[in-house]
Image (cartoon, rainbow, N blue to C red):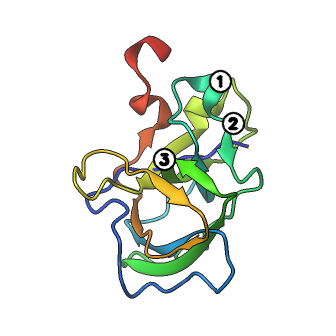
Amino acid sequence: MLTMVVACNGGLEPSPESGACPSGFIGACGTVTFRGAVPPNTQVVYVVAYEHFPQGINDLLLYQPLAPPTLDLPTGPADTTATYRLPLPAGHYEWILAVWKENGPLSFETADSLLREAGFYRNPLIPSEPGSLDIAGGRDSIDFVVDFNNMHRVSFYFPARAR
């Protein structure tokens, strides 16, 4: 499976009121705010994490968890907020994101055409860059925006030589 994320104005910004991580949970929790209408060709939106920022198409399947949680999609055009839980093994993660997937069979060959980055956790000091995250237990308030009007192919973020 591959995941896709969409860049958005707010990114994944901490929010003190999310409180989505239960006691004993290991991973990231927070809220996701949907902006824009869900595209009609949407199959699913996942939340995933990468220990190392993907450098090329062959890295796209190296996300955690292997069976990523899906987000409940909004039914109307207004902004909608929902909570999510992303179970992760303890460790360091360089990219936490939401990935939009278009209808169709996913493979290495189709990943760049079917997946879009829909939102990601942003560096609090440099909001234009992805933020990294260390997981030892539950990490709360990892909030982000999925903007269906501003999605990018995941390869948009690869170094030029890896595209």
- Does residue 7 appear left or right of residue 73 in this picture? left
Can you tell which of label 2 and label 3 is closer to the viewer? Answer: 3
Please give the label number shown on residue 95: 3
Whole-number angstrom distance, CA of label 3 to CA of label 1: 16 Å
Under mark 3, the amino acid is Trp
Q: Give the quadrant of residue 141.
A: bottom left
Q: Is residue 123 left or right of residue 2?
A: left
Q: Does the CB distance between marks 2 and 1 fall below 8 Å?
A: yes
Which residue occupies the foreground of this view, 75 or 86? Answer: 86
- The residue lying at 63 percent from left, 85 percent from top is 22
Q: Which residue is mark 2?
A: 61
Nearer to me, 43 or 27:
27
Q: Secondary structure at mark 1?
A: helix
Q: Would residue 43 be seen by someone viewing this image from the given angle?
A: no
* Residue 61 visible in the picture: yes
Q: Say what secondary structure mark 2 lies in.
A: loop
Name the spot of residue 63 as percent of width and height, x first: 65, 44
Q: Which mark is residue 58?
A: 1
Helix, strand or loop at label 3? It is: strand
Q: Taking 130 as reference, is 54 above or below it?
A: above
Q: What's the amino acid at mark 2?
A: Leu
* Residue at image point 37% right, 79% down: 78
